[in-house]
Image (cartoon, rainbow, N blue to C red):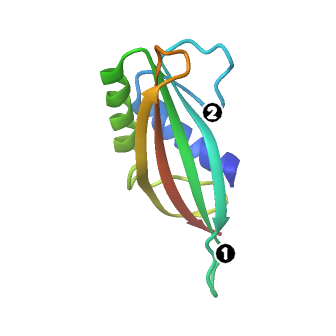
């Protein structure tokens, strides 16, 4: 489900944001950009259905603290409680979990992280 889910998230973010959105950014990507990178999943099945609970992390890189925060807010608005079309699965929910931002290792760039929990059944 990882590929299908990342494709659905990419489509929503690419339509909603004015910065470049990647599903796996190239090493020398020009700032600013958003990257759908980290993914994990666990079983969310019941007696009557097979389900998946996925966590997806969206990264933001920008030179300016306020603009980074604004992009993070736009990401939340684009995905929180918004229906996703996930090929081969029935969408249940996409919920904002948490976010944070910090100065990256270069001492200049702001790095924002926005996490979502997504539930789907097959």
Of 46 and 66, nearer the camera is 66
Residue annotated with mark 2: 23
Of 89 and 26, nearer the camera is 26
Q: Measured from the top left, where is residue 58 in percent x and y?
A: 52, 38
CA separation in Å, label 2 and label 1: 26 Å
Upstream in sequence: badge 2 or badge 1:
2
Question: Mark number for residue 99?
Answer: none
Tell me the element at label 2: loop
Q: Measured from the top left, where is residue 30 in percent x and y?
A: 56, 12
- Name the residue at the bottom extreme: 47
**Compared with residue 45, is residue 79 higher up or lower down, i.e. above or below?**
above
Q: Measured from the top left, where is residue 96 in percent x and y?
A: 41, 52
**Compared with residue 26, is residue 36 higher up or lower down, i.e. above or below?**
below
Whether tag 2 and tag 1 are in contact, CB under 8 A, the answer is no
**Compared with residue 67, is residue 30 higher up or lower down, i.e. above or below?**
above
Asked which quadrant contains residue 16, the reply is top left
Residue annotated with mark 1: 50
Of 49 and 28, nearer the camera is 28
Of 61 and 74, nearer the camera is 61
As drawn, is 114 to the left or to the right of 49?
A: left
Asked which quadrant contains residue 18, the reply is top left
For disc 1, the neighbor class at 10 Å (few under 14, some 14 to 19, many from 20) is few
Asked which quadrant contains residue 1, the reply is bottom right
Q: Measured from the top left, where is residue 34 in percent x and y?
A: 51, 28
């Amino acid at each position: 489900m990882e590929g299908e889910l990342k494709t659905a998230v990419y489509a929503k973010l690419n339509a909603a944001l004015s910065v470049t959105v990647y599903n796996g950014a190239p090493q020398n990507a020009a700032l600013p950009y958003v990257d759908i990178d980290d993914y994990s999943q666990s079983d969310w099945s019941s007696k009557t259905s097979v389900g998946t609970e996925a966590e997806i992390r969206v990264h933001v890189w920008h030179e300016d603290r306020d603009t980074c925060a604004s992009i993070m807010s736009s990401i939340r608005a684009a995905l929180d409680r918004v229906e996703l079309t996930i090929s081969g699965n029935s969408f249940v929910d996409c919920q904002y979990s948490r976010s944070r931002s910090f100065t990256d290792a270069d001492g200049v760039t702001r790095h924002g992280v926005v996490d979502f929990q997504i539930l789907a059944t097959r």
